[in-house]
Amino acid sequence: MSKTGTIRVNRIIKHSADEIVALVGDVPNYGKFIQWVKAVRIWDKAPDGNSFSAELMIGYKAIRIPFSTRVTIDKNNRTIRTSLLKNKSFSLLPNPLRLLECTWKIMPHEQGCEIDLQIDYNFADPFLATLITSNINKATSRLIEAFSNEADKRYVIP
């Protein structure tokens, strides 16, 4: 039995929408500021850099989860979308996901920008599903916090 779900997070942070779009689109550097990203591989990059395929290895303690996605960045509409690429992992480990769709919408706000993140997921492994879904709200909050902290390091606060 698998576990399907959706999580949605909405936060206001003190950086411009364009800065956060650039930061969220900077997938190759996720391992430098998101503690559980252990490795990133990028391939199939469009000439404009606004779409590419990426494999991430997510790790927490002894658990390693590899998955590959297609990333599409729309700078004009300030959205970043990722969709799971099935059977495209470079890892020898089996893909533990059946579905992973992420949509980041970043909108200007008087205090900086508003981040609206929706993640739709389905885990193939019931044990992993139980483990992750019991902590998904905490993990998602930490993810947004990691982006906010990295934005504080990269950009001048208005």
Image (cartoon, rainbow, N blue to C red):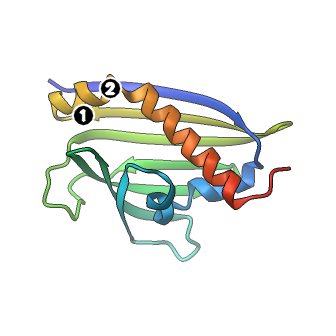
Residue tagged by mark 1?
Answer: 123
Residue tagged by mark 2?
Answer: 133
Which residue is depicted at the point 74% across and 48% down? 17
> Residue 148 is drawn in which quadrant?
top right
Between the C-alphas of marks 2 and 1, the distance is: 9 Å
Q: Is residue 113 visible?
A: yes
Give the quarter of the figure containing the N terminus.
Answer: top left
Which residue is depicted at the point 74% across and 58% down? 155
Q: Amino acid at mark 1?
A: Phe
Above or below: residue 104 compared with residue 136: below
Whole-percent x, y for residue 89 in the image: 23, 60
Whole-percent x, y for residue 81 in the image: 51, 48
Above or below: residue 154 compared with residue 142: below
Mark 2 or mark 1: which comes first in sequence?
A: 1
Which residue is depicted at the point 13% across and 60% down? 92
SS for dot 1: strand
Q: Is residue 74 visible?
A: no
SS for dot 2: helix
